[in-house]
Image (cartoon, rainbow, N blue to C red):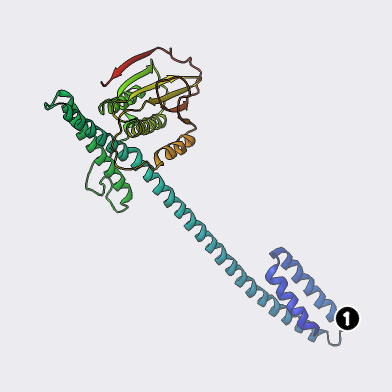
C-alpha cells in the first residue's frame, strides 16, 4: 500500500509543483531510496532498483499530467483572449455605428434641414409676390449647394461603411475624398457660413465676432466649433421658425473661446419629422471628449431671445487675450 501512495504522491507533486521544487523533491527521494538500500543491505539492491523504477514511473506520469494540465490552461487562456477580442470588436462596431449616426446627423441632417427651410421660405415669398426676385435666385442657389454638400457627405459615410471599396474610391464610385471643412477655414469664417445658412431661410441674423478670436484654435477645436455651429443652426431653423431673430457670438473669455447661438421664435417650419435628440446628445458627448463645456436653454434674462446654445472651448496660453473688439453686423431681412 505504501508504494502505491508514494507513487501517487510523486505524480501529484511532479504535475503541480514548480521545476525547482520538483528537482529538490526528486533528489530527496533518491537519497531516501539509497539510504533504505544500505539499511537493509541483504535486499538493498532489489529495493534500490525497485525504488528507482517507481520513481522514474511516477515522475514520467507526473510530467504527462503536467503537460496535459498546461495544455488545458493554455486553451482556457486562448479562449478567454478570443472572448475579450470579440467583445472589443463588438464594442468597436457599436462605437463606430454610433459615430456614424452622429456624423450623419451633423452633416447630412443639417444640410437637408437648411434645404427644407429654404424651400419653405421660397414658397412663402412666392405666395406674397408673383415675380421671382434676386432673393429667390439666392435661395435656389443655396438649395443646390446644400443638396450637393449633403450628397458628398452621404458618399463619405458610404465610403466608411464599404470595407471592400478601393483606396480613394467610395461606395458610389467617387474618386475624391471628402476633406474636413474645418481644416481650411477660420472660426470667423465658420460663423459667417452659419449666419448665411440662417439668413437664407428668412431669419434676421446678427453676428458678433471678437477681433482675432480663434487664431489659436487647432484643427480639432475648429472641428468642434463647426459641429456646434451646425447643430445650432439646425436647431434654430427647426425650432425658431421662419423670420426669427438670431445672434451668433464668438469671443475670448478667461483662457477660452465662447461661441453661442441665440434665437427667437418665428413662423413654424415644416421640417418633416420630430427631433430625435441625437444631435444635442451627441454634441454633449463630443464636447465632453474634447474637454469643452456645452450649455443650452432659455437665456434667463430680459433678452429678446427664447433659446441659447453655448460652447466653451478651453484655450490655455500665456499670451494676452485679443482685444474684445467686436464687429456687429446683420444679415437677412
* Residue occupying the point 39% across, 43% down: 276
In the rendered view of the protein, which quadrant contains the N terminus? bottom right
Residue 143 placement (x, y as % from top left): 21, 34
Residue 248 spot, x, y in % from top left: 37, 23
Q: Is residue 159 left or right of residue 322?
A: left
142 or 84, nearer to the observer: 142
Residue 97 point in image, percent of width and height? 39, 49
Q: Image height check: is 84 above or below 176? A: below
**Callout 1 secondary element:** helix
For disc 1, the neighbor class at 10 Å (few under 14, some 14 to 19, many from 20) is few
* Quarter containing the C terminus: top left
**Residue lying furthest left:** 131
Q: In the shown orientation, is residue 271 left or right of residue 1?
A: left
> Furthest residue to the right?
39
The tally of labels here is 1
Where residue 243 sits, quadrant-wise, is top left
Check the image and report above or below for 34 versus 305.
Answer: below
Q: Residue 63: which quarter of the image?
A: bottom right
Name the residue rendered at 84%, 77% in the picture: 35
In this picture, residue 235 sits left or right of residue 139: right
Q: Position of residue 22 (x, y in %)?
A: 72, 68
User: In front: 42, or 330?
Assistant: 330
- To which residue does mark 1 refer? 39
The quarter of the picture where residue 149 lies is: top left
Q: Residue at x 37, y 41 (%)?
A: 275
Amino acid at each position: 500500500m505504501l508504494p502505491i501512495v508514494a507513487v501517487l504522491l510523486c505524480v501529484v507533486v511532479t504535475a503541480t509543483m514548480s521545476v525547482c521544487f520538483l528537482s529538490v523533491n526528486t533528489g530527496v527521494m533518491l537519497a531516501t531510496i539509497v539510504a533504505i538500500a544500505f539499511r537493509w543491505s541483504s535486499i538493498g539492491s532489489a529495493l534500490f532498483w525497485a525504488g528507482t523504477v517507481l520513481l522514474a514511473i511516477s515522475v514520467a506520469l507526473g510530467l504527462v499530467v503536467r503537460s496535459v494540465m498546461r495544455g488545458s490552461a493554455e486553451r482556457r487562456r486562448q479562449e478567454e483572449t478570443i472572448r475579450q477580442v470579440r467583445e472589443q470588436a463588438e464594442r468597436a462596431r457599436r462605437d463606430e455605428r454610433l459615430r456614424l449616426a452622429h456624423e450623419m446627423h451633423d452633416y447630412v441632417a443639417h444640410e437637408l434641414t437648411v434645404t427644407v427651410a429654404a424651400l419653405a421660405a421660397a414658397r412663402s415669398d412666392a405666395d406674397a409676390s408673383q415675380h421671382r426676385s434676386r432673393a429667390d435666385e439666392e435661395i435656389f442657389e443655396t438649395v443646390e449647394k446644400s443638396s450637393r454638400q449633403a450628397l458628398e457627405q452621404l458618399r463619405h459615410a458610404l465610403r466608411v461603411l464599404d470595407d471592400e471599396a478601393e483606396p480613394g474610391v467610395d461606395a458610389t464610385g467617387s474618386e475624391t475624398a471628402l476633406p474636413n471643412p474645418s481644416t481650411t477655414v477660420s472660426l470667423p469664417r465658420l460663423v459667417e457660413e452659419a449666419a448665411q445658412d440662417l439668413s437664407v431661410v428668412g431669419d434676421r441674423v446678427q453676428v458678433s465676432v471678437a477681433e482675432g478670436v480663434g487664431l489659436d484654435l487647432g484643427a480639432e477645436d475648429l472641428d468642434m466649433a463647426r459641429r456646434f455651429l451646425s447643430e445650432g443652426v439646425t436647431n434654430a431653423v427647426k425650432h425658431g421658425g421662419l423670420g426669427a431673430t438670431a445672434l451668433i457670438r464668438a469671443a475670448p473669455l478667461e483662457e477660452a473661446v465662447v461661441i453661442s447661438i441665440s434665437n427667437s421664435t418665428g413662423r413654424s417650419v415644416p421640417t418633416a419629422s420630430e427631433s430625435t435628440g441625437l444631435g444635442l446628445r451627441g454634441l454633449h458627448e463630443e464636447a465632453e471628449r474634447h474637454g469643452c463645456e456645452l450649455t443650452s436653454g432659455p437665456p434667463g434674462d430680459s433678452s429678446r431671445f427664447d433659446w441659447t446654445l453655448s460652447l466653451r472651448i478651453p484655450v490655455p496660453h500665456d499670451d494676452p487675450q485679443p482685444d474684445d473688439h467686436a464687429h456687429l453686423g446683420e444679415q437677412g431681412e
